[in-house]
Image (tube, rainbow, N blue to C red):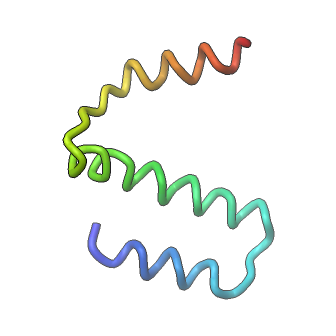
Amino acid sequence: MPGLGLGYAYALSGNPPQEIAQELKDLFIKINLRPYLERHGLTFDEENLRNLIVDNQGS
């Protein structure tokens, strides 16, 4: 998504409330994680990721 980084930076430049800033960071990571991993030769398996999250929440 071209320009997302700029929009993200712009949204955070106004010092938003902590809750909104965290949501924006989470969204940025969610959108960019797969392309980042693929550029580094790693595969992204959403099902395994979901299982990992569920396992960590259950601990």
Q: Residue at x 45, y 49 (%)?
A: 30
Residue 2 image offset from top left, x and y in percent: 27, 73
Q: Tell whether 18 sits left or right of 43.
A: right
- Depth check, front residue: 37 or 51: 37
Q: Tell whether 35 sits left or right of 16.
A: left
Q: Quadrant of the C terminus?
A: top right
Q: Residue furthest front?
A: 40
Q: Is residue 21 above or below residue 14?
A: above
Q: Is residue 41 above or below residue 12?
A: above
> Residue 18 sits in which quadrant?
bottom right
Q: Quadrant of the N terminus?
A: bottom left
Q: Is residue 1 above or below residue 9?
A: above
* Image mark count: 0
Residue 57 image offset from top left, x and y in percent: 69, 20
Q: Tell whether 5 sits left or right of 21.
A: left
> Residue 49 sits in which quadrant?
top left
Residue 50 image offset from top left, x and y in percent: 48, 22
Residue 46 image offset from top left, x and y in percent: 36, 27
Q: Residue at x 58, y 60 (%)?
A: 25
> Residue 47 sits in which quadrant?
top left
Q: Residue at x 42, y 74 (%)?
A: 5
